[in-house]
Image: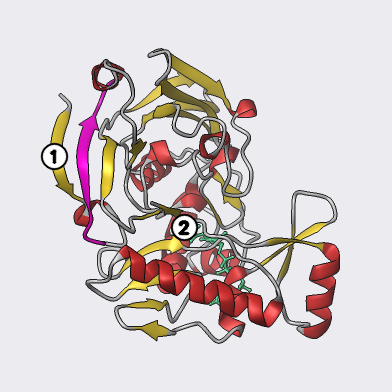
């Protein structure tokens, strides 16, 4: 049954823990419930608030927030090796990873401990340690607000990119994701190439699914603050993609600057965390907000901060990087 809240307190519903309110919030489970919500047409302002892990409210939300709470995980098909799994939008992403690891199913273990709901995973194509949600997602189920129909979109049409998808662009404000379908496999396929993963996995006795999950959890815990203790939304900024000439100019000046290949030809990806760190902003604190001292990509609410204070800090960090390196860093977090 859908649950409705008026003047909903959002402080427990966003990982920054900012105290804003939403005029109306509906927790929904089924397409029928969504249909009822949109029966008289879409309200002037609405959006989906899933786990609230990638969102910054800078003011009260004067519209409708829709929160998926459906929890089912089911096997759609199992041919002995390849297993197709459907997870409803309200499943906690890391519960899905644990579910897969428990069953010895490979494919999403590198995405362990990413906060958020399964339904949000395709929106920004969550990624970590060399893997992205798009590597496993086959289809996305959604409710179409215009037509009231349920639609399924194949991954090929989701326009997945680095922290990007069609859900942030052409389909924004037009659909509500209700479930995802992922493909997993019993054939071991460890991806240990990123950073400290290989060493941490070896220290645990080798590349089993459980060891990979535990290694990644340990790496994340060491670097990223726990949202239940310190309000934050993971990486606040995306790693910037620049043209090769810019990358070469910067690397000539800072030979130790990390540089990654970008999917687009003639471009390279820089590490925003490194840029912020070298711009002197790591650990910077401004009243109730700050830049995390172990990971410069993460902005934190030290307690009681407003979304506006976090945003002002973000602008300061962007300016510091622009002044030192001439590079623009864009926000990864959805700012409302
Ligand atoms: N670095 C610094 N100082 C810092 C942070 C990073 O010098 O304060 C350097 C690191 O030493 C490394 C490079 O910058 O050479 C990259 O850092 P790291 O490996 O920590 O990864 P990242 O690029 O900062 C990305 C994702 C994370 C993801 C990790 C691991 C983005 C914006 N962030 O961070 O995703 O967990 O890789 O794969 O792509 C998130 O999106 O919320 C998130 C946490």
Residue 19, magenta (yes or no): yes
Residue 33, magenta (yes or no): no
| Residue that appears at 32% across and 42% down | 49
Residue 265 or residue 310, whichever sits in front: 310
The range drawn in magenta is 18-30
Quick check: 270 left or right of 302? right
| Residue that appears at 39% across and 84% down | 285
| Residue that appears at 46% across and 79% down | 294
Q: Nearer the viewer, mark 1 or mark 2?
A: 1
In this view, 90 is above or below 290? above
Disc 1 packing (10 Å; few <14; some 14–19; many ≥20): few
Circle count: 2
Residue on which the image places disc 1? 6
| Location of residue 170 (image quadrant) | top right
| Percent x, y of residue 43 | 31, 28
Q: Quadrant of the N terminus?
A: top left
In the rendered structure, are the residues bearing label 1 and label 2 in contact, judged by CB atoms less than 8 Å apart?
no
CA distance separating discs 1 and 2: 45 Å
| Percent x, y of residue 282 | 49, 82
In this view, 9 is above or below 146? below
Q: Secondary structure at mark 2?
A: helix
């Amino acid at each position: 049954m859908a649950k409705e809240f008026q003047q909903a307190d959002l402080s427990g519903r966003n990982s920054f823990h900012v105290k804003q309110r939403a005029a109306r919030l509906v927790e929904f489970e089924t397409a029928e419930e969504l249909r009822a919500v949109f029966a008289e047409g879409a309200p002037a302002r609405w959006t989906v608030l899933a786990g609230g892990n990638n969102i910054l409210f800078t003011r009260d939300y004067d519209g409708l927030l829709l929160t998926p709470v459906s929890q089912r995980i089911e096997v759609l098909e199992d041919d002995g090796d390849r297993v197709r799994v459907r997870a409803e939008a309200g499943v906690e992403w890391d519960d899905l990873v644990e579910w897969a690891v428990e069953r010895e199913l490979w494919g999403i273990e590198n995405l362990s401990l990413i906060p958020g709901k399964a339904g949000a995973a395709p929106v920004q194509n969550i990624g970590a340690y060399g893997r992205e949600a798009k590597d496993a997602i086959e289809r996305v189920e959604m409710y179409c607000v215009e037509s009231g129909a349920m639609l399924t979109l194949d991954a090929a049409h989701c326009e997945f990119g680095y922290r990007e998808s069609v859900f942030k662009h052409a389909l924004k404000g037009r659909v509500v994701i209700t479930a995802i379908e992922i493909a997993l496999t019993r054939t071991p396929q460890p991806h240990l190439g990123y950073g400290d993963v290989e060493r941490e996995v070896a220290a645990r006795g080798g590349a089993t699914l459980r060891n990979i999950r535990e290694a990644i959890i340990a790496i994340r815990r060491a670097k990223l603050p726990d949202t239940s203790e310190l309000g934050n939304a993971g990486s606040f900024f995306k790693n910037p993609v620049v043209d090769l000439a810019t990358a070469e100019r910067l690397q000539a000046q800072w030979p130790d600057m990390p540089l990654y290949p970008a999917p687009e030809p003639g471009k390279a990806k820089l590490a925003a965390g490194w840029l912020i760190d070298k711009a002197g902003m790591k650990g910077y604190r401004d009243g109730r907000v700050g830049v995390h001292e172990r990971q410069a990509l993460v902005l934190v609410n030290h307690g009681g901060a407003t979304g506006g204070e976090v945003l002002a800090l973000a602008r300061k960090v962007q300016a510091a990087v622009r002044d030192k390196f001439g590079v623009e860093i864009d926000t990864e977090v959805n700012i409302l």
